[in-house]
C-alpha cells in the first residue's frame, strides 16, 4: 500500500456568504494541501454577491458547490456541508481565512501519532482585512486551549477554522441544536468532550484567522447576546445528556 493510499481521505467543509472579497484566496490556500481523492465542500448560504461565480470558476473536480435556496445561517450551512462529507478526517474552514502551508500534513500527523484522539485543534495568527498581522497567537489573546465542557461554557476556546476531527464524531454531534445560537464549532467540541472523546492541541499557528468588519462570527457581542448564547448552549447540552443512553 502506498503512502497516498494509507493517508485518510480528507473533507474540508466551508460555509460561504457574501465572501467574494476573500474566498478565492482561501480556496487557493487549501487546494494545494489536498490529495487527489480529497474534497472541498462549500455551501453557499444564498450569497448576494459574486461568491458562487468565483467558486464555479475554480476548475478543480475536488470542489463541490451547494447553494441554499434561502439564507439559513452559518450553523445550518455547516451542518449541510458536514452531512455531505465522505472523508475519514474532516476539516472546518471559514471563507475569509488563509491556511498556512503544511496545515493538513501536520494535523493528519497528529491523528496518526495519537489514534485515540478524535479532535485536533491548532493555534492561529490573527490578521486584518488586508492581511497584516494583528496578533501572533489566537490563544495568547483568548487563553490556553481547554477541551472540557464547563470551561467552554465560561469562554469558548473552540475556533472552527482551526479544528479537524474524525468523521465518527458526526454521528454524535448531528443534528445540531435547532436555531443558530449554538455555533457549529463549540457544539462539536463540547459533544466530543461529553462523549469522552480525546482532543489534542497543536501549539502552532496553522491558520491566518482574518478579523474584519463583515466577518460572520468575529464581531464583539453584547452582554445580553453572550448570555443568550450560553443559555442556549446549556439547554442544548442538557437535552443531549438526557437523550444519551
Image (spheres, helix red, strand yellow):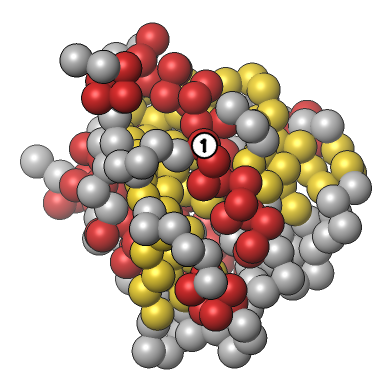
Q: Is residue 86 left or right of residue 110?
A: left
Residue 15, percent across and down?
49, 65
Residue 95, percent across and down?
60, 61
Up the image or down, 109 lies above or below 197; here it is above
Q: Image quadrant of residue 37?
A: top left
Disc 1 is placed on an element classified as helix
Residue 151, percent across and down?
54, 34
Residue shown at 31% from the left, 17% from the top: 3
Query: Can residue 71 be seen?
Result: yes
Q: Is residue 178 left or right of residue 125?
A: left
> Residue furthest toward the front?
59
The quadrant of the picture occupied by the N terminus is: top left
Label 1 sits on residue: 33
Residue shown at 29% from the left, 36% from the top: 9
Between residue 40 and residue 85, name the one nearer to us. 40
> Residue furthest toward the top?
113
Up the image or down, 152 lies above or below 96; here it is above
Between residue 216 and residue 129, name the one nearer to us. 129
Residue shown at 19% from the left, 47% from the top: 171
Residue shown at 67% from the left, 47% from the top: 98
Up the image or down, 217 lies above or below 3; here it is below
Amino acid at each position: 500500500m502506498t503512502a497516498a493510499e494509507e493517508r485518510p481521505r480528507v473533507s474540508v467543509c466551508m460555509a460561504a456568504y457574501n465572501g467574494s472579497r476573500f474566498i478565492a484566496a482561501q480556496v487557493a490556500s487549501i487546494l494545494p494541501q489536498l490529495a487527489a481523492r480529497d474534497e472541498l465542500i462549500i455551501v453557499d448560504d444564498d450569497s448576494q454577491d459574486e461568491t458562487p461565480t468565483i467558486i464555479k470558476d475554480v476548475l478543480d473536480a475536488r470542489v463541490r458547490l451547494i447553494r441554499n435556496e434561502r439564507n439559513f445561517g452559518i450553523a445550518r450551512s455547516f451542518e449541510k456541508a458536514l452531512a455531505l462529507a465522505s472523508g475519514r478526517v474532516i476539516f472546518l474552514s471559514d471563507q475569509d481565512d488563509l491556511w498556512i502551508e503544511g496545515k493538513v500534513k501536520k494535523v493528519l500527523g497528529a491523528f496518526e501519532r495519537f489514534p485515540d484522539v478524535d479532535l485536533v485543534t491548532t493555534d492561529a495568527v490573527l490578521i486584518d482585512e488586508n492581511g497584516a498581522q494583528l496578533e501572533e497567537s489566537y490563544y495568547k489573546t483568548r487563553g490556553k486551549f481547554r477541551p472540557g465542557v464547563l470551561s467552554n461554557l465560561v469562554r469558548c476556546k473552540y475556533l472552527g477554522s482551526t479544528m479537524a476531527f474524525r468523521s465518527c464524531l458526526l454521528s454524535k454531534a448531528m443534528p445540531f441544536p435547532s436555531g443558530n445560537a449554538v455555533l457549529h464549532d463549540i457544539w462539536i467540541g463540547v459533544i466530543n468532550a461529553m462523549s469522552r472523546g480525546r482532543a489534542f492541541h497543536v501549539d502552532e499557528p496553522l491558520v491566518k484567522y482574518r478579523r474584519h468588519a463583515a466577518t460572520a462570527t468575529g464581531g464583539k457581542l453584547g452582554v445580553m447576546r453572550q448570555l443568550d448564547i450560553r443559555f442556549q448552549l446549556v439547554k442544548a447540552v442538557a437535552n443531549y445528556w438526557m437523550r444519551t443512553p
